[in-house]
Image (cartoon, rainbow, N blue to C red):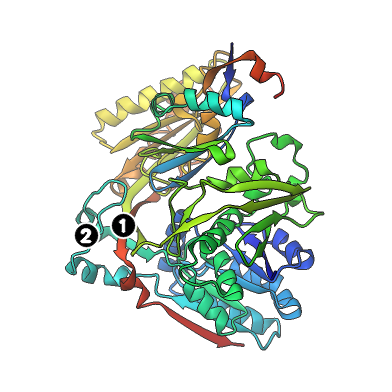
Amino acid sequence: MAMVKLNEIAQSRSGDKGNTINIGVFAPNQEIYQVLLAELTTVSVKMHFSGLVKGKVTRYEMPNILAMNFVLSEALDGGGSSSLRLDNLGKCFGSNMLRMEIEVDDELLIDL
Amino acid sequence: MKKVRIGAAQGFYGDTIEPAVATAEKGDVQYLCFDALAELTMAILVKDKKKNENGGFTKDISLQMKALLPYVKEKGIKLLTNGGGINPVGAQQEILRVAGEMGISGLKVAVVTGDNVIDRLPEFLEKGYPLNHLETGESVENIKDRLEFANAYIGAQPIVKALAAGADIVVTGRTTDTAQFLAPLIYEFNWGEEEWDKLASGVFMGHLLECSAQSTGGNFSGKWWEIEGFDRMGYPIAEVSENGEFIISKVEDRGGLVTIDTVKEQMLYEIHDPSAYITPDVIVDLTNVKLENIKSNQVKVTGVKGHPRTNTLKVVMGYENGYAGQVIVGFSWPDAMMKAKKVDEIIRIQLERNGLNYEEVRTDYMGYNALSGPLAHDNQSELNEVFLRMTVRAKTKQEAVKFSRLFPPLALNGPPSMSGFTGNTAPRALLGMWSALLPREEVERQIQVEVAEV
């Protein structure tokens, strides 16, 4: 097993709607997708974003494109035109998601 | 099978028009569709309209028309935009003016109005529609005296009507981002109002095109460094078949890339439940979508499902929400971070001593954590410099100004090497966003389509 930063094995993009952020996370193959399903839970993601996200985290699964969509509420300090943050549209939430570290079987990393 | 080719022309107010011109020239499209309106854009346009009664539409509409009207005349390409923003009639007049100035005649420009519901809010409340906040459930009574705008997201049908009336150009206010893209399909293929799968496919196509290059390699989080031509990105083009299936591509010699990986990042952008993406035209279900790379820079999309549309429309309202005061000052090595933190401490003591109670006082260290907040790495190495950004949320403009006045004296009184201070930033008005639902027919009966000819 190896500790891997999500950045090395996944893609992500975030978007805003009001005070809510969504983050799409995309796996490169079925095996990694299964690992992500186990590791990226609503609890682990909520913990990862503590200090930024006050509300609840919801996860939607998209096995057809090997993706998950996380919806984070109360995440933007009031929302785009009201937020004091520099990242007021949450464009960096996707990047910040990729900071998460998870354990992955060495074998699964060979072809990436 | 009949096919319709649609090109993306704009992903936001301020986007470059150059790729749209390339698509008009070489993309073999019948329609160029623009999405000019983010939530934030409506706020900007409201401020514009306050300054100038004739303003309130996206100003870049003039440049877009100058660049594209020749193609409208020569090739019959139709232009559909929601750049009318808060003043669609003003935008229509501007388009007619530009066309006249260019000596173009025989052009039909349609305008769709009726999305603006701010004057009808008292009537709605009286009728018992609560207009409570969709996310929090909060009562609208708390903010209704501070409202700046209220617009319902309307769908594709009025635009279809405008096309049927022979419009070459259709300008609207707050339609959904995808309405401009779906409308030509309904018009060309004569899709029925209950052909949910086809409508959903059209909305999803629009979703993939509405953010311009975000489907063609822009903002791509994968191996972005392998993407060529960021300096001349191509915008996506969709070739849609009558059954709703479509292929995403781009003009071959423009920059960017169309692959399953670039397309799927856009697929979930700003979407919540992927099995129920709610629009005024249809509820879209993406959980069976299949993406196939059929050729270089061509991705085929199938399997979009649709469900009956809702009886409600979303209304987004903006309300005054105080002012932000902001100061940015830099500190040099050695001990840049320590100096910046010391100034943060000094300011907070002074705020307390002067009895300045702001709702929120925010500190960011630019070059260290300003984009990531608490998620930033704990940087142990010595920074060459760091910029301290402090922001407050104040009730009034005057209170916000008081904040920035605390900083200049610290250049002489505080820790060494405070520099890069570019003067106090003028306070910025903050606008809160309020989403609520309204019965569809309340909005739809006031929608109007009018065509003018130059």
Displayed quadrant of residue B446: bottom left
Question: Where B59 falls versus B388 (above or below)?
Answer: below
- At which x and y percent is residue B380? 55, 13
Which chain does the residue under circle 2 lie in? B
Number of numbered discs on residues: 2
**Residue B425 numbered mark, or none:** none
- At which x and y percent is residue A112? 70, 24
Question: Farthest right residue?
Answer: B253
Question: Badge 2: few (under 14), some or many (20 or more) residues near its Cα, within 10 Å?
Answer: some
Question: Farthest top residue?
Answer: A1
Displayed quadrant of residue B17: bottom right
Displayed quadrant of residue B198: bottom right
Which chain does the residue under circle 1 lie in? B
- At which x and y percent is residue A111? 72, 23
Q: Secondary structure at mark 1?
A: strand
> Can you identify the residue that label 2 sits on?
B130
How far, Cα to Cα, is label 1 from label 2? 8 Å
> Can you identify the residue that label 1 sits on?
B436
At horizontal 22% and vertical 63% (from top left) the residue drawn is B129
The amino acid pointed to by label 2 is Pro
The amino acid pointed to by label 1 is Ala
Q: Is residue B283 visible?
A: yes
Disc 1 + disc 2, Cβ < 8 Å: yes
Q: Secondary structure at mark 2?
A: loop
Mark 1 / mark 2, whichever is N-terminal: 2
Question: Where B82 falls versus B452 (above or below)?
Answer: above
Question: Where B232 falls versus B69 (above or below)?
Answer: above
At horizontal 31% and vertical 57% (from top left) the residue drawn is B436
Do badges 1 and 2 share one subunit?
A: yes
